[in-house]
Amino acid sequence: MKRLGTVLILLLAFAGLADSLYLAEHKITGDPLICNVQNLTGCNVVANSEYSRIFGLPIADAGVLFFASLFVIAALELIFSDRLLRRVLQVGATLGVCMSIFLAIVQVFVIKALCIYCLASGMIMLIIFIIAIFLEPLRRIAPELTPELEPVSPGTNFLRDTLTMPPT
């Protein structure tokens, strides 16, 4: 099941990469985005807003780097089947979904325009997050660190027998 989840993350990361590359190309060339899906015609408004950059870097470029990283990590996890790589995928997916939620809020409440490509990227990220959560279950106590207790036979007083020092 972990392998199937990782393959799905790999495919979704590729889709997110393609989406981000299209947006990044728009940023470089200045060509308008093709955006005419019912009420989601604000792609160019969102892509050209002052909120389309973070720390001077276009968010589309950050998306390319992010989805490419997820793609590489998922590919490595398929090859090596490593728990640490699954954890890195989980952390990356958590950061990505938080950023996607933040950007969706900015679109709705600040820019007041919706970009179908941005929303698609957010949905891809949400699905990756859901899959990544199930890749490696979180445990409160690692089983290898839990001490094994010896069974106590009926009729014994565990506390008295444990705390009483044998006579010397």
Image (spheres, grey):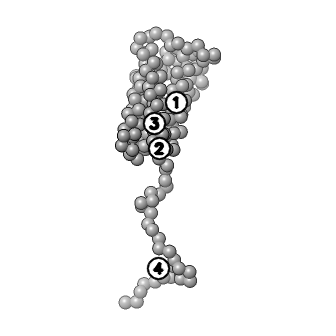
Compare marks 1 and 2 and give the one earlier in the sequence. Answer: 2
Compare marks 3 and 2 and give the one earlier in the sequence. Answer: 2
Compare marks 2 and 4 and give the one earlier in the sequence. Answer: 2
- Residue assigned mark 3: 7
| Residue depth check, mark 1 versus mark 3: number of the one nearer the observer | 3
Looking at numbered disc 3 in the image, what kind of residue is underneath it?
Val
Compare marks 4 and 3 and give the one earlier in the sequence. Answer: 3
Residue 68 in the image: x percent, y percent?
40, 29
Q: Which mark is residue 2?
A: 2
Q: Which mark is residue 162?
A: 4
Q: Do tag 1 and tag 4 residues touch (Cβ < 8 Å)?
A: no
Cα separation between marks 3 and 2: 9 Å
| Residue depth check, mark 1 versus mark 2: number of the one nearer the observer | 2
Q: Which mark is residue 11?
A: none
Cα separation between marks 1 and 3: 14 Å
Looking at numbered disc 4 in the image, what kind of residue is underneath it?
Thr
Q: Secondary structure at mark 1?
A: helix
Cα separation between marks 1 and 4: 56 Å
Viewer-side residue, 107 vs 123:
123
Cα separation between marks 1 and 2: 19 Å
For residue 8, say whether it is visible: yes
Q: Secondary structure at mark 4?
A: helix
Cα separation between marks 4 and 3: 52 Å
**Quadrant that contains the C terminus:** bottom left
| Residue depth check, mark 2 versus mark 4: number of the one nearer the observer | 2
Viewer-side residue, 125 vs 99:
125
- Residue assigned mark 1: 124
Looking at numbered disc 1 in the image, what kind of residue is underneath it?
Ile
- Residue 123, located in which quarter of the rendered image? top right
